[in-house]
Structures are given as structure tokens and as C-alpha cells.
Image (cartoon, coloured by chain):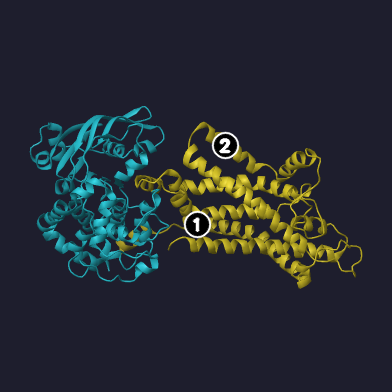
Chain colours: A cyan, B yellow
């Protein structure tokens, strides 16, 4: 099952990622949906429903039945149907201003100013303990969940300071999703319920749940592999599938930014490759920030790369430049493997 | 050849270590056997003495109170069974939500605060309090204090107090086992904390919570001391929480000191009934817990 899914999925994507796929996804964005996506979420749901026939409100068992094929359905080409399910949405930029983060008295992030451009992949590299993860966790205010932890400075989502007293942390996290180091599907839930969890857990009553779940699973490149076992336990999938399930779970709530904290460090190389391809596709709809220890990975997926050391930002720039011609000597030493 | 022999000598298990291994193995096997002896004896005596008094009427008639003539009918234990079920059910309805609530607070909110440590300390103290103290406490507050008489609900209060620390402590241990990554990933989806607790943390912990609650129920169902001077002893079945109520431990307690053989046998029958009831509850709850979790 998984090997079938693998070949089917990877082959066309490998060829097409850079050229066809991304380009056409952007086309769709530009022509049809840009206005509505910016205006209102509801309008955008409507366009999605137009594209796929409305799924009847059914139970999980019903989802196990093969669905009548939709206009751009599975049989044709995985990439095109994946794109059909994708929510064409414009990501938002994030700007850190003098961000400092503390654990108790220990200052882990020491005043970072950094821009994450909308619909780009920005990689954060740096040796262990340099504050990469902590900084990223400040962007959706997960840092403050740790007892004794606090953050200072500003984090702007477009123009909005998410640390403003009037801002609801729950809304921040819905707009800025997160994928963690270890795949962690909810153990009591099926594949379907895992993806639906974000929608069900948020206070608004989810409408058109099945359509959204399918769309999120397609967005995470997992639909073909799991469509016949949506009712099975999410924890029963392979490690790479579980991580894509977690990505689908965060896509389901339609965030504008996704933070990835070493999303591939627990995965084998093939699963890693799939996630990287996925990241490349996803940036059409969201802004991505990825923390990684793997410099090849940063070089492969990131448009821009930031190098951190001892809680400070050393350098940020186009990935190409960071790896070939960095401005700072420390960056060069790190990327050439002299330390770290 | 000579090198082979030499190698074998180097890597062979020495006789001394083999002896020690055998000694250690037999010691722990012996300890297990010793621990099993009383358990087997209890089951054996319960079955051999208790099964004899089981009959249809044993479960369907109230005790008559007539214990002086072996020939006359002494009645069954219906009121004791119903009383135990009712008192324990009320006690659980009080103790389980509060106990799990305290555990959720300790794990999800209190964490390492000073107040949380104080609560933990007193929960531990309560766990070690002899059960008769809970009876005494209820006796002083609800019976002497109000100048009223024994009542079933007062017995249920005493049992609830007894169950509370057991439920709290076991639930806390189980909730602590839920990986923080699960909470974080739910929070990162934009879920409010209370929903994370109700939809992710508690369902994931359910099998463990059920086990803890069962331990508490099993302990409470077998307690005599908290009921002695709170629920009282009576013969008749009655469902009023305001009246006296019989229970299996009290029935056993009063019967076993009787001079009449048939009454003592009724105590064995009642004891076997109590054990079987707790066993059935265990099996049932385990089935429910297993079905409720995926895979």
C-alpha cells in the first residue's frame, strides 16, 4: 500500500514540482481566488465547494466507501487533484522586532529582528541550543505554555502585533500553525478525526467537515494513501505518513503561516524527501518557517535562510548566498562544518 | 584445537555465576509463590464456604433478623446487595468528578505552584488516613453535629471522602503520563485549553482513569468501618438515602460473629458476592475502556 502510494505520488511531483505544479497553482491563485481569499474566509470556502461536488455530511464509516469521482479526481493525475483540493490562500508575512525570550531568568533569544516574507520558505539553522526552536515557538505564542517562560518585543503578523493585550492567543494559533519534531497524531483518534480535530476543537462549529478534511489530506499529499482507511487509527500509519497527517491537521484550520520545528528529524530519507516536496508545494498557500539541523535540507527547501548563534541572529539572506557567500565569518564556519 | 578450548574457557559462564543465577531465580520465584499462597487460600475458602449458601432466595430475600434457631429461615442478603450498590454509586458520583477535577487542576494548571504542592501533600495524607476516621468525621459532623440519625447518604459521604484521594492520586499519575507534545499540538491548532483537556487529554487518559476509579470503587465497596456509624445496619431493603441502609460489609460484619452456623455461612456467601460484584465491575469497565479507544 505505502510503496504504491509512494511511487505514484513522488514520480510526477519530482518532475513537476518546480515548473508545472507550482506555476499552475499560482495561476489558479491569481485568476480566481486572490480577492476572495483576502476578503473573507467564507467566500473562499464557497469557491472550494464549487470546484468539488459538495460532500454529504456523513459518518466516518461512510468515508471508507470510495467516493464518486470528482471533476479532477484521483485517477487522472495525483498532482492535479492535489492542487484541486488545495486552498488557494495567500500567506501572510511575519516580522520579529527585538524579540527576546526567557526561561525564568535565562535569556534564550536575545533581541532578534527578522522578516519572514509571505509565501516563502525561511529556514532557521544554527547549532543546538542557539534558540532556534524557542524563537519559532514565540511566533505562535507556544513559548508561553512552558511554566516560567516569557517573551518580550514584538511579533507582527502583517501589521498586527500578536502579543498585543487585545489579541486572543487562540486566534493567533489558528492563523499560525505548527508542526512538531516528532509526528504526534492524537492517539485516540482515527485518521479522519485527527485531521478534523483542529476544526472540531476550535469553537466555531465546522461546516462541510468532510470536504475540508479531504482537502487538507490532499494538501498534505496523503489522500491517496489513506482514503481507504480514514477510520483507522492515525497512530497506525508509518512515521512519514504520520508527519504528513500532522501537516494535514494543521492545514485543515487554514493557517496563513506554518511553523515547522525540525519536522523531518525523526523520519527516514524517503519520508523526508516527501515532506520537502510538500513544503515546496505548500508555500503557494502559506508562509513557512522551518527549523532544521540539516543544512542540505535548508539548502533544498528554503528561499531564505537565517543563521542563529547563542540566541542572536547572525545573518539572514537568500539561501544561495548564505551557503556560498555569507557575509559573516561565523556563518561560513558553520555551513562549512567547522563547528556545530 | 587448543585455541578453541582456550577461547571457550574465556567466554564460558563460570560455575560460580551459574550458581548465583540459580539462587537468585529461585529466590524471586519463591517470593512470588509465597505471595500467591494467601490469594489462592482466600479464593479457595470463599468458594468452598460461600458457594454453599448461594441460592435464588439468598439473593432475593432480605435478612429476617431471626438468628437463634438454625431450623428457621434466616433470609438472604438482598438488602445488603442493593444497599452496597446504592451507597457506592452515590459515593462514586461524588468522588469521581471531584477527584478527576482536582487531578486535572494539579496537572494542567497548578503544576509546580506552591498551592499545588500543598494540595498534593494533603491528598497523600488523606490516602493514608485509616478508613474509620472518615466514618468518625461524618459521624461527628453529620450525626452528632446535626443531632440526626444514621442515613445512607451519610455513609455515602464517608465512602466518598475515602475514595477522593485514591481517585485524585491515580488520575494525576495517569494525566502526567500523557505526553506534553499532545497538548502542545492541540494548542497549536488553536484549541482553547479547556477543549484540549476534554477532547484530547481526558480521552487519551481514559483507560488509566477507569483503572484508578475502579481501584477506588473496589476499596470503598469493601469498607466496613466508615459505614458502621454512618449508614447504620438494617434488615429491610429501602432506597431512601435518608434512611438506614444495609450493606454487604456490614452484613458480613454482623453475621460472622453469630453463634449460628447458617448465619456465619451467610457471611461467607455475602463475602463471595462482594468479590464477584467487584470482579464483574472490573471486567465491564475494562471492556468499555477498550472499546472507547481506537486500535
Q: Quadrant of the C terminus of chain B?
A: bottom left
Q: Determine if residue A293 is in view.
A: no
Which label sits on residue B53? Answer: none
Q: Determine if residue A48 is in view.
A: yes
Q: Quadrant of residue B250?
A: bottom right
Circle 1: element type: helix
Question: Quick one: A93 or B126, which is closer to the camera?
Answer: A93
Circle 2: element type: helix
Q: CA distance from mark 2 to mark 1?
A: 45 Å
The answer to whether marks 2 and 1 sit on the same chain is yes
Q: Which residue bears the numbered disc 1?
A: B21
- Counting from the top left corner in percent of width and height, residue B168 is at 57, 45
Q: Residue furthest right?
A: B69
Left/right placement of residue B21 relative to residue A189 reads right
Q: Residue at x 43, y 43 (%)?
A: B193
Question: Quick one: B225 or B238, which is closer to the camera?
Answer: B238
- Counting from the top left corner in percent of width and height, residue A125 is at 20, 40
Q: Which is in the foreground here, disc 2 or disc 1?
A: 2
Which label sits on residue B119? Answer: 2
Q: Residue at x 24, y 59 (%)?
A: A85
Output the chain of dot 2.
Answer: B
Output the chain of dot 1.
Answer: B
Q: Quadrant of the N terminus of chain B?
A: bottom left
Q: Label 1: few (<14), some or many (≥20) within 10 Å?
A: few
Count the numbered circles shown: 2
As drawn, B282 above or below B244 = below
Q: Quadrant of residue A155?
A: top left
Left/right placement of residue A241 relative to residue B53 reads left
As drawn, B11 above or below A255 = below
Mark closer to the chain start, 2 or 1: 1
Question: Quick one: B92 or A299, which is closer to the camera?
Answer: B92
Amino acid at each position: 500500500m505505502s510503496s504504491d502510494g509512494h511511487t505514484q505520488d513522488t514520480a510526477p511531483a519530482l518532475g513537476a514540482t518546480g515548473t508545472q505544479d507550482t506555476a499552475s497553482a499560482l495561476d489558479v491563485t491569481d485568476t480566481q481566488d486572490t480577492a476572495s481569499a483576502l476578503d473573507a474566509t467564507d467566500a473562499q470556502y464557497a469557491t472550494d465547494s464549487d470546484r468539488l461536488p459538495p460532500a454529504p455530511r456523513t459518518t466516518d464509516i461512510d468515508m471508507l466507501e470510495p467516493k464518486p469521482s470528482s471533476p479532477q479526481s484521483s485517477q487522472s493525475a495525483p498532482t492535479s487533484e492535489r492542487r484541486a483540493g488545495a486552498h488557494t490562500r495567500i500567506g501572510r508575512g511575519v516580522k520579529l522586532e527585538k524579540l527576546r525570550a526567557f526561561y525564568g531568568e535565562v535569556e534564550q533569544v536575545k533581541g532578534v529582528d527578522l522578516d519572514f516574507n509571505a509565501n516563502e520558505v525561511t529556514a532557521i539553522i544554527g547549532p543546538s541550543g542557539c534558540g532556534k526552536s524557542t524563537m519559532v515557538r514565540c511566533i505562535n505564542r507556544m513559548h508561553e505554555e512552558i511554566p516560567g517562560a516569557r517573551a518580550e518585543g514584538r511579533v507582527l503578523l502583517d501589521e498586527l502585533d500578536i502579543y498585543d493585550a487585545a489579541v486572543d492567543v487562540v486566534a493567533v494559533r489558528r492563523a499560525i500553525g505548527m508542526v512538531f519534531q516528532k509526528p504526534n497524531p492524537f492517539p485516540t483518534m482515527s485518521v479522519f478525526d485527527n485531521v478534523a480535530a483542529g476544526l472540531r476543537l476550535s469553537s466555531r462549529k465546522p461546516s462541510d467537515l468532510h470536504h475540508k478534511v479531504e482537502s487538507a489530506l490532499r494538501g498534505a499529499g496523503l489522500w491517496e494513501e489513506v482514503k481507504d482507511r480514514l477510520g483507522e487509527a492515525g497512530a497506525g500509519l508509518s512515521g512519514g505518513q504520520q508527519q504528513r497527517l500532522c501537516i494535514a491537521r494543521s492545514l485543515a484550520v487554514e493557517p496563513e503561516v506554518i511553523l515547522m520545528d525540525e519536522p523531518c528529524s525523526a523520519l527516514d530519507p524517503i519520508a523526508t524527501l516527501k515532506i520537502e516536496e510538500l513544503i515546496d508545494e505548500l508555500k503557494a498557500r502559506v508562509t513557512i518557517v522551518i527549523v532544521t539541523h540539516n543544512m542540505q535540507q535548508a539548502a533544498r527547501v528554503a528561499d531564505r535562510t537565517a543563521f542563529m548563534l547563542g540566541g542572536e541572529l547572525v545573518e539572514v539572506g537568500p539561501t544561495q548566498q548564505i551557503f556560498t557567500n555569507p557575509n559573516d565569518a561565523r556563518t561560513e564556519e558553520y555551513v562549512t562544518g567547522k563547528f556545530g | 584445537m587448543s585455541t578453541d578450548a582456550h577461547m571457550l574457557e574465556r567466554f564460558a559462564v563460570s560455575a560460580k555465576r551459574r550458581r548465583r543465577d540459580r539462587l537468585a531465580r529461585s529466590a524471586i520465584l519463591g517470593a512470588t509463590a509465597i505471595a500467591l499462597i494467601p490469594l489462592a487460600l482466600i479464593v479457595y475458602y470463599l468458594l468452598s464456604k460461600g458457594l454453599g449458601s448461594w441460592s435464588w432466595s439468598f439473593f432475593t430475600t432480605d435478612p429476617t433478623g431471626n438468628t437463634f434457631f438454625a431450623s428457621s429461615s434466616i433470609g438472604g442478603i438482598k438488602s445488603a446487595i442493593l444497599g452496597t450498590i446504592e451507597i457506592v454509586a452515590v459515593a462514586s458520583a461524588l468522588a469521581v468528578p471531584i477527584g478527576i477535577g482536582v487531578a486535572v487542576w494539579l496537572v494542567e494548571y497548578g503544576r509546580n505552584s506552591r498551592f499545588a504542592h500543598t494540595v498534593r501533600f494533603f491528598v497523600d495524607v488523606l490516602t493514608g488516613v485509616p478508613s474509620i476516621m472518615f466514618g468518625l468525621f461524618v459521624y461527628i459532623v453529620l450525626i452528632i453535629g446535626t443531632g440526626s440519625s444514621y442515613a445512607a447518604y451519610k455513609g455515602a459521604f464517608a465512602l466518598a471522602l475515602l475514595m477522593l484521594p485514591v481517585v485524585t492520586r491515580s488520575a494525576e499519575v495517569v494525566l502526567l503520563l500523557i505526553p506534553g507534545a499532545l497538548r502542545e499540538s492541540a494548542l497549536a491548532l488553536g484549541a482553547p485549553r479547556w477543549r484540549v483537556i476534554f477532547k484530547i487529554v481526558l480521552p487519551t487518559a481514559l483507560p488509566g482513569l477507569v483503572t484508578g476509579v475502579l481501584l477506588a470503587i473496589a476499596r470503598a465497596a469493601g469498607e466496613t468501618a466508615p459505614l458502621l456509624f454512618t449508614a447504620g445496619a438494617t434488615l429491610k431493603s429501602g432506597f431512601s438515602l435518608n434512611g438506614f441502609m444495609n450493606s454487604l460489609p456490614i452484613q458480613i460484619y454482623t453475621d460472622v460473629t453469630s453463634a449460628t452456623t447458617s448465619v456465619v455461612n451467610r457471611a461467607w456467601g455475602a463475602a463471595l458476592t462482594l468479590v464477584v460484584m467487584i470482579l464483574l465491575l472490573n471486567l465491564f469497565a475494562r471492556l468499555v475502556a477498550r472499546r472507547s479507544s481506537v486500535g
